[in-house]
Image (cartoon, helix red, strand yellow):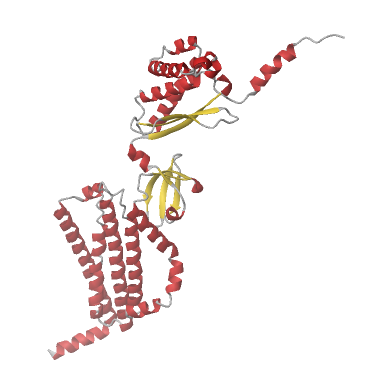
Amino acid sequence: MQEQLAQLDAWTAEYSHLAMWLGLTVLLCLSWCANFVVKHILLRGVLRLLNLERKQCEQRGFDLRFIARLSNVVPALVISTLVHKVPLLPDLVVQVTVNVTNAFVVLTIAIALSNLLSLINNLYSRRPDARNKPIKGYIQLATIVIYAIAVILMIAALFDRSPLILLSGLGAMAAVLMLIFQDTILSLVASVQISSNDIIRVGDWVEMPQLSADGDVIDIALHTVKIQNWDRTITTIPTRRFMTDPFKNWRGMQESGGRRIKRSIMLDQQSIHFLGKPEIEQLSRFSLLQQYLREKQHEIDTWNAQLAEQGKEPVNTRRITNIGSFRAYVVQYLKNHSGIHQDMTLIVRQLSPSAEGLPLEIYCFTNTTAWVAYEGLQSDIFDHLFAILPEFGLRVYQQPSGLDVRALNRPALNHPTVSE
C-alpha cells in the first residue's frame, strides 16, 4: 500500500500540471451539471406547481427569470466549496476564486430578487385598484436598497473583510450620500405623499402648463411621472414636482359624470329693446316660451295696474324685453336638452358689458365627459343659439372687419364729383 501511494505521489509530481488541469476540468463539469439539473428541476417544478407552460407564463406576464438566476447560485457554491480540492492549485488562486464566487453569489441573489420584485409589480398592476395605489415607486426603492446592500457585501467578499467594517465607514460619508441620493430621497417622499393622499393615478388627465404637460398619466415611477399629451408626445416630469408645483387633475370631472360648459355669446347692446305686441305674438309661437310669456305678462300687468295715473305713460311701466325673453328661452332650451345634466348647476346670466358687447354666459354641465362627444354637444347648442338670435331681434357683436370698412367707404367713393 505504501508503495502504491509512493508511486501516486511520484506520478503526481511528474504530471503535476496535468493533475491540476484535470481537477479544474472535473470541477467545471460538476458545476455545469449542478446548474443544468437545478435549473431544470426548479423551473419544471414551479411550472408543474402552477400548472403552466413556459409560453403560457409569458402570455400571462409571469416572468420566471428569477428562478433561472437562482439556479446560477448552485454552480458558484460548488466551485467555492471544491476549489481547494484541486491538487497543486496555488493558495492565492484558491482564495481569489472563493472571494469572486462569493461575490457572484451575492450579485446573483440581488438580480433574482430584483426580477422577483418586477414580477410582483406586474401581478399587482392587474388588480382593479392598482391604478389608484401604484407600488412601482416602492418596488424601485426596494430594488435600490437591495443593490446597495449587495454592493457592500460584494466588496466585503472580494476583500475578505467583514461588512461591518464597511458600514462603520459609511457614517463619515452620510453627508456625501445625502447629496448623491438627494433626488431619490425627495422622490421617495413625494411618492409616499402621492400614494397616501391619492393625488394622481395612472389614467388621470393632468394639466401642468408650466411644464407643457396636458394629457393622461401613463406611468408613475419613483423618480418620474410620464404624461402622454393630446398631441401624442410624452412629457416626463420629476415626481417631486407634483408636490411643489400647482397642477390640475381632471379626475373629479370624469368621476362626476358631467363636464362643464362655460361660454358667452357677445350681444350687440344696440339691438336690445322692449317687445311690442306683434313681437310678443310672434315669440308666442315658441313652445318653450309660452309659459314664460304668459306668467311674465301677468306679473307686468299686475305691477302696472298699481301705478294708477302714472301708468298711462309707457316710460313708467314695466315691459317685456327681447334679451330677457331670449335668456328665458335659453334656460328652457337647456332644461329640455337630452345632452345636459339636469342634476348639476344650470345658469344663463349676463356678465359686465365691455367694449366687445354684452356677454350672455351659458353655464351648465353635459351628461358626458368624453372629449369628442362633449365638443360636439357644445357646438350643437351654440349653433342653435346663434341661429335663433334674429328671431328675438338680437345681433351678435363683432369688431368691424376690412369688409365692413370698405362697405362704409363705397358710397363716398362712388359719389360723383362736383365740377367747378
Residue at image coords 30%, 61%:
114
Residue at image coords 47%, 52%:
245
Q: Quadrant of residue 270?
A: top right
Q: Position of residue 100 (x, y in %)?
A: 32, 74
Residue furthest to the front: 309
Q: Position of residue 162 (x, y in %)?
A: 32, 80
Residue 376 relative to residue 33: left or right: right
Observer-nearest of 392 and 19: 392
Observer-nearest of 65 and 407: 407
Q: Position of residue 265 (x, y in %)?
A: 50, 27
In the depicted structure, whether residue 392 falls above or below residue 146: above
In the depicted structure, whether residue 376 falls above or below residue 68: above
In the depicted structure, whether residue 141 falls above or below residue 286: below
Residue at image coords 85%, 8%:
419
Q: Quadrant of residue 101?
A: bottom left
In the depicted structure, whether residue 180 falls above or below residue 85: above
Residue furthest to the left: 1
Q: Position of residue 357 (x, y in %)?
A: 57, 27
- The answer, for residue 59, to whether it is visible in the render is yes
Q: Quadrant of the N terminus?
A: bottom left
Q: Quadrant of the C terminus?
A: top right
Residue at image coords 63%, 24%:
401
Residue 295 relative to residue 39: left or right: right
- The answer, for residue 27, to whether it is visible in the render is no
Observer-nearest of 171 and 327: 327
Observer-nearest of 317 and 215: 317
Residue furthest to the right: 420
Count of marks placed on residues = 0
